[in-house]
Amino acid sequence: MSKRDYYEVLGVSKGASDKEIKKAYRRMAMKYHPDRNTDGEDTEEKFKEVNEAFEVLSDDQKRGAYDQYGHAGVDPNMGGGHGGFGGQQGGFGDIFGDVFGDIFGGQGGGGRSHSSVQRGADLRYQLELSLEEAVKGTTKKIKIPTLVACKPCDGSGAKKGTSATTCTTCAGHGQVRMQQGFFSVQQACPECRGTGKMIKDPCRDCHGEGRIQEYKTLSVKIPTGVDTGDRIRLGGEGEAGVNGGPAGDLYVQVSVADHPIFQRDGKHLYCEVPITFVDAAIGGELEVPTLDGRVKLKIPKETQTGKLFRLRDKGVTPVRGGSRGDLMCRVVVETPVKLTERQRELMQELKDTFAEEGEHKQSPKKSSFFEGVKKFFDDMAS
């Protein structure tokens, strides 16, 4: 029986790209996989046909031979001898890796060897700063526990003067294939744990791991304007890699502590400034704190609680650039306490003068409030 055209098997044109061929293969492999289609009598044959077509068309050399010579160019049994794929059909492990690997982020099958060289893990360090340190920038020294390459064995894991040998179980590939009937599953070698190497005489310092835990002190430069949630990356300061792999990175996570006076909102600062009853009524001048020192704040007469005064350029310069923020001072009128007898007399005299002239002049909000209350109850009674 003659074989069908491979392009026809996958349902693609001869000019199809590698991406289109792979997409078509996934679709057809899912359609005809025996585990998903147990009723069809020819399902397994079609599945093998799809797998065979993809194995040829996904390989540039085999595809070129097939385009030039047809099936004879890739099948030695037909006398072509121009490449051929050796008659090995991809098992379930191959299909699982190719079809599902991209979806779940896994590694493909197909007998590919996995490198034992691994990048070190990234580390995270929580660094708390004061508001002043965050706004103005500083340099902090931090001490972190991390895995570093073992110096006595130079990270090899083998005792000095010896070296690792090739694993006899996986022949150095780091992976073994388990076959049971139709199914073929590829997994990390249990003997060498996927490294492909065996250490017969391990280093006494790291016990064959190639890495040891140490504390190291680092100097971290904090730029001006950082805020809670910002991260500073220190490249190569994470854990050491495995078998000569590159080290990971260290991420310093910034957390800014609460301040007793200021609250921060982006590039602006806010603070509450208590003022006396007298200053609020007749006006005055007082000193207020900023991160740059004290400044004079003029309070106009008849200032009410909650009024905001803006001090320009007394806020924060954003870490990512831009103009400096402002300091917003919210005044709070403070009721006097622990009055002397004379002070109470004066306050009573003042109150009497308010009554004589009518409170609506000095306390318009109070007058309008009680007028609204009276109207509310009158409406309820009517």
Image: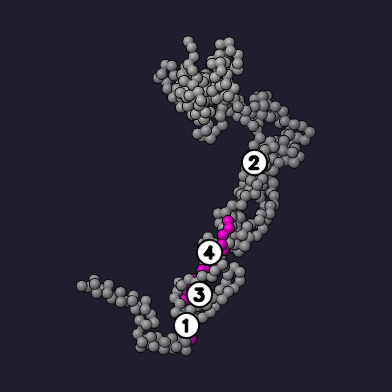
Colouring scheme applied when the structure was drawn: one colour
Cα–Cα span, label 1 and label 4: 29 Å
Res 120 label: 2
Q: Quadrant of the C terminus?
A: bottom left
Give the x, y percent position of residue 79: 58, 10
For residue 279, above or below residue 248 = below
User: Between disc 1 and disc 2, whose residue precedes?
Assistant: 2
Contact (Cβ within 8 Å) of mark 3 with mark 1: no
Q: Which amino acid type is marked by label 3?
A: Pro
Q: Is residue 279 left or right of residue 154?
A: left
Image quadrant where residue 188 sits: top right
Q: Is residue 22 left or right of residue 171?
A: left
Q: Is residue 2 visible?
A: yes
User: Magenta stretch?
Assistant: 320-340
* Residue at (67% x, 52% y) in the render: 143
User: Between disc 1 and disc 4, whose residue precedes?
Assistant: 4
Res 268 label: 4
Give the x, y percent position of residue 375: 27, 74
Q: Which amino acid type is marked by label 2?
A: Gly
Q: Residues within 10 Å of mark 1 (few under 14, many from 20)?
A: few
For residue 257, above or below residue 242 = below
* Disc 3 target residue: 274
* Disc 1 target residue: 282
